[in-house]
Image (tube, rainbow, N blue to C red):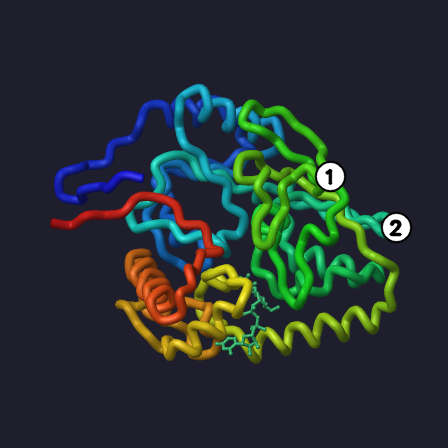
Amino acid sequence: MHEIDLKTEVPKRDSRYDRLAACLSAGTRICFDEPMARRTTLRVGGPADVYVEPAGEPELALVLKFCGENHIPSFTVGRGSNVLVRDGGFRGVVICLAAESFRHIEVESQQIRCGAGARLKAVAVEAKRYGLTGFEFLEGIPGSVGGGLRMNAGAMGSAMFERVETVRVMDHSGQIDELPPSSMDVAYRCCGLLKDKIALSAVLRGKKGEPAEIAERMNQFSRKRWKSQPAAPSAGCMFKNPVTVPAGKLIDELGLKGTRVGGALVSLEHGNFIINEENASAQNILDLIELIRERARTERGLELETEVEIIGDSVSIH
Ligand code: EPU
């Protein structure tokens, strides 16, 4: 990470990005200086030098190889629900698998094959339509299959990798592999292998269930979530739960709900949510994160670790 000085540095387009754009097919979407506030659910963050939605796997391979050969950092986002981009933005290429070819969901017997760009909610809805149970917990997670795999997303006592049979992944040289969870370094809210490789699609497995019961379970989860979690822009839970106490309960017990830095607020509904209530900057949110971590450290001896991934550059204004 480096700092940008707003007064002295005038951003100019790196010519390598024009070369990248020239290699891509018409079906690939590319934007320059794309505000990441538009691409993340927290609605904060400066621009990415390049934002690209590859049309398909060959174009994704091309982008990854180009970045590798030209020493350009890249970062893959899903629906941006677990990412906090600093105000200076991201120097490099942000990749999003939002194109149609990454969004398929096919149900066959008890398996679901889905692209990394498919929405988790859409997977839950398709599973319900085909009478497959085991995916109800995905209903309220505002992410994509790729993001859900990367974070081993979870809710209501279940986590993504409990349903995974195999994941198709691409490395930075464009090589594709199909892997079982046992070789993917999976843990609570993390898949180690996907820190480096990119998930393209996955095969998930459910069980035959009664459609009415599946629908009822989804409604029950939805009611529980609406009762306990805020609807305002956020990145879901900000911190991983420590082993000894849920982070939300801890923050609540520390009396930090309602604490504000600029436009960022610790939710009154759930202590582990920081909401962008009023045009918060990324720095407001980062300051609030530090304030919470400091209180947890000094008053409870606990080191809170963010679940949300923090990327990009800070801004310095003299
Ligand atoms: N609690 C409080 N005060 C609060 C918040 C929670 O006392 O302000 C208490 C609750 O009453 C409950 C306990 O803390 O006894 C746990 O709370 P909750 O059931 O809301 O679950 P959580 O551990 O805070 C986890 C996931 C959520 C997921 C929910 C629902 C993590 C970090 N969070 O939250 O996932 O939606 O369970 O299943 O594991 C996310 O990952 O972004 C996320 C939102």
Apparent side of residue 245 relative to residue 18 in the rendered image (left or right): right
Label 2: which residue? 109
Quadrant observed for ligand 1 in the rendered image: bottom right
Q: Label 2 vs label 1: CA separation?
A: 19 Å
Q: In the rendered view, would you say 39 is above or below 63?
A: below
For image coordinates 62% across by 59% down, the residue present is 154
Label 1: which residue? 180
Nearer-the-camera pick, 212 or 33: 212
For image coordinates 57% across by 54% down, the residue present is 189
Q: Secondary structure at mark 2?
A: loop
Residue 280 shows in the view: no
Kindly identify the amino acid type of the residue bearing the numbered disc 1.
Pro
Q: Position of residue 28 (x, y in %)?
A: 53, 34
Q: Position of residue 90 (x, y in %)?
A: 36, 41
Residue at disc 2, CB closer than 8 Å to ligand 1 = no
Kindly identify the amino acid type of the residue bearing the numbered disc 2.
Ser
Q: In the rendered view, would you say 6 is above or below 258?
A: above
Circle 2 residues within 10 Å: few <14, some 14–19, many ≥20: few
N-terminal of the pair, mark 2 or mark 1, is 2
Q: In the rendered view, would you say 231 is above or below 315?
A: below
Q: Position of residue 77 (x, y in %)?
A: 50, 45
